[in-house]
Amino acid sequence: MWQGKLLHIHTCAQGGDDMVAHQSARLHAGVGIEGDRYATGRGKYSDFPDVREVTLIEIETLEALVRDHDLTLSVDEHRRNLTTRDVPLNHLVGRDFWVGDVQLRGGRLNTPCRYLDLLLGRAACDLLEHRSGLNCSILTGGTIDVGAPIRLER
């Protein structure tokens, strides 16, 4: 059985704004991360129905971009809320799991989009195919902290 770790938490107030790092965040079941663009309906894709209360990406993806493509994408540039280590996100579609004391359900794999390339001013979209993270719903709200364990069982 695996156990991962929460490395970074990021939010932004509205689509296109810079991502802001946090040491902790309050997650509201069925809504999103307090103050984040998708919790308030001000995200780039808020008008498109989908599960995106919280989004995750693996740090291993960012490391692979540097290793395999000489492209550095910092943890505040990938536009996902939570950056993880040792968490098999692609295998969590449709599964419930825990980040600290907050229970999430994996929705769908995130699709990379050209909007990211526009914001970054460089081509990352195609390189993130099948590794762009996981959109999740929040089943049990609460506060999460950087360093929290991520696991299937509580």
Image (cartoon, helix red, strand yellow):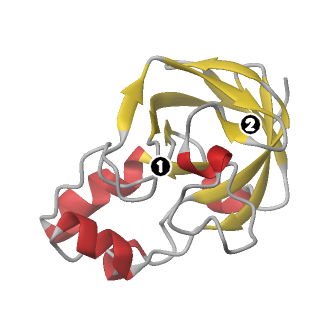
Left or right of 27, for residue 21: left
Left or right of 74, for residue 81: right
Question: On residue 58, which mark appears?
Answer: 1
Amino acid beneath label 1: Glu
Left or right of 144, for residue 70: left
Q: How many other residues sit within 10 Å of disc 2, few (<14), some (14-19) or many (≥20)?
A: few
Q: Image quadrant of residue 48?
A: bottom right
User: Does label 1 or label 2 sit earlier along the sequence?
Assistant: 2
For mark 2, what is the residue?
1
Could you tell me residue 22's position as x and y percent?
A: 43, 23
Q: Is residue 83 above or below residue 16?
A: above
Q: Residue at x 30, y 46 (%)?
A: 18
Q: Classify mark 1: helix, strand or loop.
A: strand
Could you tell me residue 107's position as x and y percent?
A: 77, 61
Q: Nearer the viewer, residue 41 or 104?
A: 41
Amino acid beneath label 2: Met
